[in-house]
Image: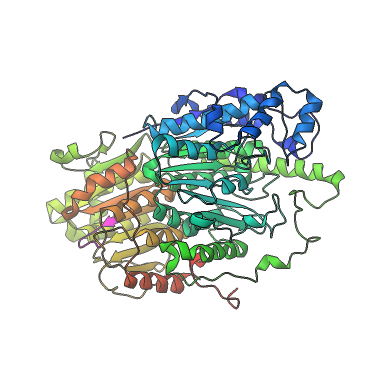
Amino acid sequence: MASGTALVYDDEMTSHKLLWDDPICNIEVPERLSSCYELLKHYNLVERCVPVPVREGTEDEIMLVHSSDYLDVVKSTKKMNEAELQKASANYDAVYFHPSSYRCAKLAVGATLELVDTVMSGRTRNGMALVRPPGHHSQRNAANGFCLFNNVAVAAKYAQRKYGLQRILIADWDVHHGQGIQYIFDEDPSVLYFSWHRFEHQQFWPSLSESNYDAVGQGKGKGFNINVPWNKVGMGNSDYLAVFLHVLLPIAFEFDPELVLVSAGYDSGIGDPEGKMRATPECFAHLTHFLMHLAKGKLCVVLEGGYHLRSMAESVCMTVKTLLGDPLPCLSGEMVPCLSAIESIHNVRAAHKPYWECLKYEDTIPLQYLSTRSYQMGEAETMQTGTPLVNPQEAGKINSDEAVKTERFLELHMKEILCLGPPVKTAASLAESDTHLLPPSVQIVKETNVKGLKAIVSGFDAELLKEENNLNSLLQMLAILDKIMKKEVTNGLALSSIASRSSIVALRHCSHSRLQKLLCVFIGDMDMKIDLDDGNILLINISAKQPMQPNTKYYVSLNWKEDVERNSFFPVVLGFILPVAYSYQPDLTILVIGPNRSLGKNEISLLACLLQGIAESRIFALIQDTERELFQDVAMVFTGDFTPYFGSYAPALKENMQMLKELKDQLEQKWKMLQCSVKVTLTER
């Protein structure tokens, strides 16, 4: 199984620079690249990655996307003087040329293709290419928006030709619409293109009608182009998370890509003068974490935009840390998407409902009367160029003040969220005869403070002390939990012959250890009673049995009928469990696999993988000993030693989807992240 994270970088790409005064292009500077690499070195991330040398993209490779005439135009700039370069640049929108531009653009293409080769050949599992000039705006016959050659589009065509790939996902989280990629693959069902971008009812650059949600692709490509238009600025962590959970990921898992390419523009991050959005650096860690579970982990992240150097560099570092398998920081801020984001998400889901099984059961219709429609151009926050509507003489001062504020915020924020991961990632308790089943990186734990742990068990359930087998498994469970809570290990797992009763002890012990919020996901028949009124515990029970009590905010029963031949559990994980879990923001997650489970191995693996995004990746799995065959699978998921394949998407049973719909309707006011996938009416808004 492939392991390791590739990093592709060459500082020669910093030689591409602007030679004259241009207020639009002057933000695309060489320091965009060098500041990212220097911060990666500062955090000791470069030495943890696999270095990949850069090469030039060949003319044949570039012409997989671009015309020979356009290639000749870019090639001709290497012999031009400054006046000629300025004249050539004026033929395109927001573009500049330098004598080194052709060489740098070829290096950017070649670096991206080297990353694809490294990942597809299995030399590494994933990786990032730090390149410039960026690419996602460039088109077959034209440079556009700082972009000369379309690096990611060339990479997709290259991967199709060299590796015979039939399904490639391109996720574009740059704040501008990558219309170049859209045009190239508009009729191609083998490439699923996703882009969120500032749109503001077509008032923001590139100001195209085809950037709106109803541009879904052409011909055979209908349904394979997903545009999420942001109609206001200020989108933050919860808005970005909501789009991934309710739009991109359901469709992506159904599409089942063989490779994921990311057009990684960090102008969608906090403090960026172009984006004016509020996503903090750790948001990109969570987005990366989600994408790592597609395509069996084959993920290539390629730099696009980003114009606040500190914000961009911190976000790049968070992306690379996640690719390396580090624990994820908690996502900051309240998990409540704004009304404008909810409207955009509903419109995208409605537009794509005819093309994707995961959306067909939804009661979605396009919303015509959007909350942002009341904006008049004179009152809007931005003009088409994205420039604030202020006195030009004051604009520089305002931008400078905002940049300083962002710098100060990030200085404090990164100190809070950046911490070294525990020296051991995964701990487990298992009989000596079974330890060969575990990956070698798993630490086998045997209880040490027997007297102290016995006192804990006695305080919760003295009856459990009477049977030695039960007592031993409880002591081992508590020993692992203590290691997780002390941050000596990231996660852990244990077997138990009495999963329900053991889970009560685990939850109470964690509560008494001053963890304020605990998420417990219990799979199977649950025989436990515990006080849930104070919000200290959120319990989600997934069982084929009818619930014993009505659903409340902190007790949720998913009455799920097993579908053993296919994985139809994606809508539940993405559309319900994760939105609720992220809204709750627990300090620790406990996953219990009890008797009579109604989920198969693929569904449990999916849960175990994605639940590691919350609670700083601190998760403990308690597995009924009759389900011993799952122990090895969960252990391998926790260590990150491999990325499981969850199976092809299949529509859920009608009764399961009806149950899920009713549950969302019932709880959407309590957990706001659910509002992105419930029926919205004008009166409700």
Q: Is residue 133 left or right of residue 42?
A: right
State the residue in front, 467 or 90.
Answer: 90
Q: Position of residue 504 (x, y in %)?
A: 28, 60
Q: Is residue 238 left or right of residue 542?
A: right
Q: How many marks?
A: 0
Residue 213: quarter of image: bottom right
Q: Position of residue 412 (x, y in %)?
A: 60, 41
State the residue in front, 564 or 338.
Answer: 564
Judge whether 420 appears above or below 332 on screen.
Answer: above
Residue 595 on the magenta span: yes
Q: Is residue 4 left or right of residue 446?
A: right
Q: Is residue 318 left or right of residue 455?
A: right
Q: Quadrant of the N terminus?
A: top left
Residue at 33 percent of width and 54 percent of height? 648
Residue 243 on the magenta span: no
State the residue in front, 33 or 55.
Answer: 55
Residue at 54 percent of width and 26 percent of height? 58
Residue that extends furthest to the front in the rendered view of this protein: 69
Task: Note whether residue 184 is visible.
Answer: yes
Q: Quadrant of the C terminus?
A: bottom right
Residue 251: quarter of image: bottom left
Q: Position of residue 556 (x, y in %)?
A: 37, 68
Q: Main SS of the magenta segment?
A: loop
Judge whether 465 appears above or below 363 on screen.
Answer: above
Residue at 26 percent of width and 46 percent of height? 633
Residue range corresponding to the magenta coloring: 592-598
Residue 399: quarter of image: top right
Judge whether 139 appears above or below 362 on screen.
Answer: above
Q: Position of residue 306 (x, y in %)?
A: 64, 40
Task: Note whether residue 419 is visible.
Answer: no
State the residue in front, 550 or 154.
Answer: 154
